[in-house]
């Protein structure tokens, strides 16, 4: 996929005597929805609001979205739910995880990795991550397994997928449940197998900034196990089976999918591959342009030949993280630090923080990662602007 090459102007130092205006800023957050996306959302509101059926959650549009996503993910079933966090809770509940159980999660990642475990009464155990890819360290995960361990929840992080083949083998050998947090990874794959399809249950999030983000909260769980699928469907709707209202087969939660959002996602599903391809073009440029800086201390994960990377966030690592962020800001490029502290160092997880040995990979990732702009509206010129500024930083004194 070739990006549109729109120049952002002549470099200011090309003609130092001329008072050239500064190039337009390239903020980190993606642009607001396009006029086309707004129109699709308004159409979705009108369609659902005027439908004689007057079903606003878990209706035929949700069912159709689930059906169409099954083929993309290469799984037997897709179950839509209210949010990514709710999806993790549903997955753990469906797998029978409860009070007294331990669940191993990465120490570097989003807060719901830990809070969803607490929500089902279980104990989060924070395992270290690989220093370069920032995904769950399989060897450290195995070291933290105890007789109380019930499940492992690896999370794909930034552009890297966790080592799912190794984790599938570990979970099978130790007889543990496996939940694949692929919230960010729609469109990624490993050995030709889509992210989200490797575990007992997988998860995609539709939070607005995700690759298939929408205008609100929502997610889907993926499974090849009919019994797990049935249980998730019960749990997401207060334990009801979708046939007879008011008959609650077990205690569930409210994690139902909105029909307006389903209509919106259905309208956009046909253009998803194009949006992913535009993100992939930016990622490919970053990979190629920044690879020579690896010898100078910039960590850019090498995905390998049989991996299609996650297309949500592109993050590099460097010991000069704060200086690089300031340099990029001076060049009009926004950046973001996602997780300034590992999960085991957050106050709410303090009671579980010292569970096992140190986690140097997570500490390093929190101290060194920096996310670069990445969205489907970026041009090739904008991507070049980012990498040109990074190269100029590493060409400075003491950093070459």
Image (cartoon, helix red, strand yellow):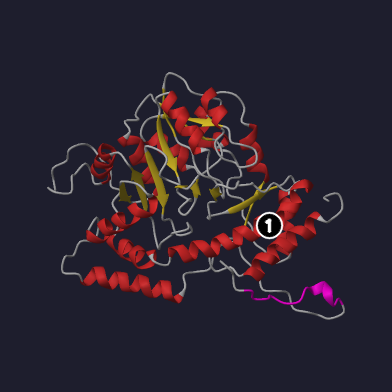
Residue 68, image quadrant: bottom left
Foreground pick, 228 / 323:
228
Task: Tell me the residue that label 1 is attached to.
Answer: 288
Q: Which residues are magenta?
A: 5-16
The image shows residue 2 at horizontal and vertical percentages of 59, 69
Image coordinates for residue 220, horizontal then vertical, percent: 35, 50
Q: Position of residue 14 (x, y in %)?
A: 83, 75
Q: Residue at x 53, y 38 (%)?
A: 163
Q: Is residue 358 magenta?
A: no
Q: Nearer the viewer, residue 393 or 200?
A: 200
Q: Is residue 239 visible?
A: yes
> Which picture quadrant has residue 214?
bottom left
Q: Is residue 103 visible?
A: no
Label 1: element kind: helix
Q: Quadrant of the N terminus?
A: bottom right
Q: Is residue 7 magenta?
A: yes
Instruction: Tell whether 222 sits left or right of 384.
Output: left
């Amino acid at each position: 996929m070739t990006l549109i090459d729109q120049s952002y102007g002549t470099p200011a130092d090309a003609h130092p005597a001329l008072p050239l205006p500064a190039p337009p800023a390239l903020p980190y957050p993606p642009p607001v929805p396009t006029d086309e996306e707004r129109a699709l959302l308004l159409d979705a509101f009108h369609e659902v609001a005027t439908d004689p059926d007057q079903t606003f959650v878990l209706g035929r549009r949700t069912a159709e979205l689930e059906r169409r996503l099954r083929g993309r993910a290469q799984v037997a079933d897709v179950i839509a739910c209210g949010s990514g966090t709710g999806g993790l809770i549903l997955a753990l509940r469906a797998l029978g995880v409860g009070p007294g159980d331990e669940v191993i999660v990465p120490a570097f990642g989003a807060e719901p990795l830990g809070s969803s475990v607490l929500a089902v009464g279980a104990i989060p155990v924070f395992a270290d991550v690989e220093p370069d890819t920032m995904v769950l360290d399989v060897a450290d995960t195995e070291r933290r397994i105890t007789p109380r361990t019930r499940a492992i929840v690896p999370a794909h992080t930034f552009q890297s997928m966790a080592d799912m083949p190794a984790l599938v083998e570990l979970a099978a050998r130790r007889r543990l449940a496996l939940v694949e947090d692929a919230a960010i990874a729609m469109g990624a794959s490993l050995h030709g197998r889509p992210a989200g399809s490797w575990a007992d249950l997988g998860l995609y999030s539709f939070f607005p900034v995700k690759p298939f983000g929408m205008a609100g909260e929502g997610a889907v769980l993926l499974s090849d196990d009919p019994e797990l699928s049935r249980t998730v469907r019960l749990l997401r709707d207060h334990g009801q089976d979708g046939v007879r209202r008011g008959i609650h087969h077990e205690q569930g939660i409210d994690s139902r999918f909105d029909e307006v959002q389903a209509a919106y996602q259905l309208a956009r599903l046909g253009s998803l591959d194009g949006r992913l391809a535009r993100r992939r073009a930016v990622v490919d440029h970053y990979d190629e342009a920044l690879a020579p800086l690896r010898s100078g201390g910039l960590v850019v994960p090498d995905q390998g030949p049989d991996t299609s990377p996650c297309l949500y966030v592109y993050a590099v690592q460097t010991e000069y993280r704060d200086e690089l962020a300031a340099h990029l800001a001076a060049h009009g490029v926004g950046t973001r630090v996602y997780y300034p502290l590992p999960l085991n160092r957050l106050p709410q997880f303090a009671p579980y923080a010292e569970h096992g040995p140190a986690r140097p990979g997570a500490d390093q990732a929190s101290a060194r990662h920096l996310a670069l702009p990445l969205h489907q509206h970026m041009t090739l010129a904008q991507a070049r602007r980012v990498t040109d500024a990074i190269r100029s930083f590493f060409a400075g004194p003491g950093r070459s």
